[in-house]
Image: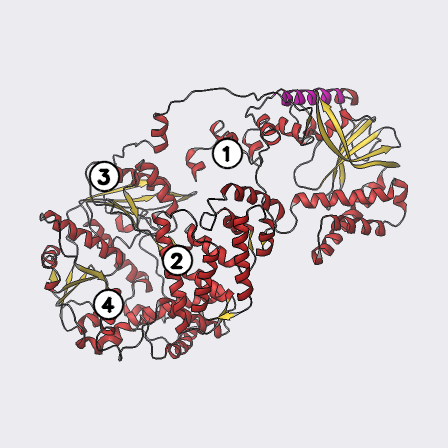
Amino acid sequence: MGTGAQWPFIEKSALFERLALGRSAGVTVVTPNKRLSQALMLEFDAFQIARGLSVWEAPDILPFGPFVQRLYEDGLYADLSAELPMLLTPSQEEELWRQVVGGSGVLGEMSAVSGTAANCRDAWNLANAWRIRPGSGNQDTEAFASWLKSYLDGTGNDVDTARLPDMLHKFLPALTRPKLVVAYAFDILPPQTKEFLDALATEVAFSGPEKQSASLKRASFDSAKHEVEAAARWARARLEAGGRRIGVVIPSLEERRKEVVRVFSRVMGNVRPFNISVGIPLVQYPVVALALSVLRISQEEIPFEEASRIVRSPFIGGGESELGARMRLEARLREKLGASVALPKLIAAAGQTPLLRALLEKLYALRETGLFSRKTPAEWARHFSAVLDAAGFPGERALGSDEFQAQAKWHEALGELSRLDRVSEEIPFSAAFQILRKICADTLFQPETPDTPIQVLGLLESVGVEFDHLWVAGLTDEAWPLKANPNPFLPLAQQRKAGIPEASAETSLALDRRITDGWKQAADEVVFSHFTKEEDRDVLPSPLIAGVPVAELALPPFPKLRDEIFKAKKLEVLQDRAAPPVREKKVQGGTRVLSDQAACPFRAFARHRLHADELEEPAEGLDASKRGRLVHLLMQNVWDELKDSSALKGDLAPVIARAAGAAVKEMAIEGRFAELEKQRLARLAHEWFEKVEKQRPPFSVVSTEEKRPIVFSGVTFDARIDRMDKLSTGGHAIVDYKTGGGNLSAKRWQGERPDEPQLPLYAVSAKEEISAVVFAKFRPGDMRFVGLSRDDKALPKVPKAKEGWQPLLRDWKKEAERLGRSFAGGEAGVDPKKDLITCRYCGLETLCRVYEKINVLAEEEFEE
């Protein structure tokens, strides 16, 4: 590895003096990365301000890669344009690799091909930067060497970014070069970089941050979350004390970005004086995600969640004008559509939103012209733009700053797709869409924001940056030093010989030790921290900070923003547990009304008087409710034909087959899926009749799925009794089919506010003499009746009521009247019977805000 040791070293203060002379001094500073270039630019601005200047010429500071590309572009605009090869864009390079890897037949799936292509591009960049010759070694390196030959053939006379510095060598004498090039804060200088700087035939020098005499401290915390919160409190304290350059370094910042933003926002209050250095993939910005969803539905089915976002989005035409109508449409779509949605179905359902329907019809017209066709990437980019224009993208309202910048980046992504024409032939929609989506997924985007005093950085982004105060978090023995991570496509021995830091534990340790020493001199105050527990496992500090003294940190307990808001509150407390009494004599909702009243009075009030309910979640295939409905229809059809137990002695197969077919037809299930459901229902029915119905004393079925009104406390409720049998032992049995999970037991009918009051309600309101009440447990391998009876002869294995049948009916009647009276009287308090267990599947939590009343979870756990 070249070190550039023959180059002189320039102190940073002297470098700034040279830069202050302006571009005429001919000084260019190159850095290892963009973050360091930006930081150095800000430091120079501060230097000029300290000199009393208000206007100055911007210095020439940029990363090494853009510096090389700028020289290349200068050549294109000079007399060298005819001699210089065309430079491939990163997307073009990756597309060539994708064609090579995909054409090899080694990998099948598109995702595997794309991932391998990206790794091959990284390996080729690494091989050129460190002068490694791809070759034999193992199966991976041999495959890469073979792919590389095809890739180089595919590039033809063009050049990629990996070879650009080498290609420019012979053209450098004809290019305008700076008088002085300063390599700033290069801890590692790859051979390709050193050779290029040497080939400039100009003055080259090193420079780096000024060493500071820092106050070093080390701290530990019991969890990674508490460590981040402590760092945020420390940063705010230093900011309020007058700090202007405050750095917080957090490992795995990309994975923990949301958590870090949440914690820092909460600690900082109603201002946001911090910047997170790591962006998020462009595909995650709502305006870009919506654009991709519109393109996708224009050609193929999409998941319901995506279709829902299209309907609700402000980024398509009419999003503001039809806001209310589209919200109502979205609620209806959850009941009508399945787990996946095609454009024609969405158009058919959008009748009450004319603007939306018109836009969708325009999309369908474009879909007709592009269906099954193949186009060049540039043609697809134009088609995609036309589709989005037809959808009224990006909507009626003015975009916010972040949205506007994300949209501009989206147009750049479309431009990247267009440029693939140089390396790609005609492709179908699916390939073009996947390429565009990958470009968006690979583009980490951070909207531009004003300069902030607090910078939150990743581990390696802080190298070479100077601060007034610096906190480096997460320095556990597993996270630091970094583990060796050699590239699998290059020979390992050559990587180690070249000195690539990631190639071996030794070189990685050496680099990380230098970085740690740099941190120790990067600020007046430096805090190293680590956490001691990860779940139930003990974690040790990194050996690279073992020598730093442990110190107690004074971290003020800053109030959280929500606490500040509540402190300034003016609240009037009003206990409002009662709604107006029910005026209607008949209430919709059936016995579920009283079931909800027993579970929680507010639930009954919200669902059956306010008509509030959670939104449906379309599922793939049949959900549990529809499967249960199929069983109800099956049994209804069977008993409508059989009538009584005497018919069980014959061949049931034809009866069951007809009943299953009728049930599937009524549920509008078609195709191969219908045949599978018929077979499933037939198996269930045969098992049920063999194990349960044929073992009973004689009986007759007097009604199936019968609707009848029931009255409690002057209010009429609709009821539907699954089945009622007349028993040879006397009386009638009420049967309720149960096909779902859960523990079925007669205990669910007992006591105040019973969990399942439905059957007791039927029993005490029936005009017939009731002598048994049972669930029909309709589950494969566990078919049986569960319930209570007047005596133990009514139904097999159904016990009689211990307290006596008539006392049980009186208790049921009393509780039914109480529930009816409380509902009719307007009792609507938030009072879940079993606290949050009752609330788990309610879906009304945001309306009743039960978590403000019952907070059984610690705040730290609940917020995650």
Q: Amino acid at mark 3?
A: Leu
Which mark, residue 70? 4
Q: Quadrant of the C terminus?
A: top left
> What amino acid is at disc 4?
Arg
Percent position of residue 563, x then y: 36, 29
The answer to whether residue 196 is above or below residue 690 is: below
**Label placed on residue 239:** 3
CA neighbours of label 4 inside 10 A, class few (<14), some (14 to 19), many (20+): few
Residue at the (76%, 22%) spot, across then down: 809
Q: Secondary structure at mark 4?
A: helix
Q: Which residue is mark 2?
A: 410
Q: Is residue 801 visible?
A: no
Q: CA gap, disc 4 to disc 1? A: 55 Å
Q: Nearer the viewer, mark 3 or mark 1?
A: 1
Residue 810 within the magenta-colored segment of the rendering: yes
Residue 846 — which label?
1
Separation (CA) of disc 3 from disc 1: 37 Å
The amino acid at mark 1 is: Thr
Q: Earlier in the sequence, mark 4 or mark 2?
A: 4
Closer to us: 478 or 796 = 796
Q: Which residues are magenta?
A: 809-825
Query: Picture coordinates of residue 242 (x, y %)?
Result: 19, 38
Tell me which numbered mark, 3 or 4, is placed earlier along the sequence.
4
- Secondary structure beneath dot 3 equals helix
Q: Residues within 10 Å of mark 3 (few under 14, many from 20)?
A: some
Report whether 753 appears left or right of 556.
right
Task: Choose the circle earlier in sequence order: 2 or 3.
Answer: 3
Rendered-image quadrant of the N terminus: bottom left
Rendering colour mode: secondary structure
Mark 4 near mark 1, Cβ–Cβ under 8 Å?
A: no
Q: Nearer the viewer, mark 2 or mark 3?
A: 2
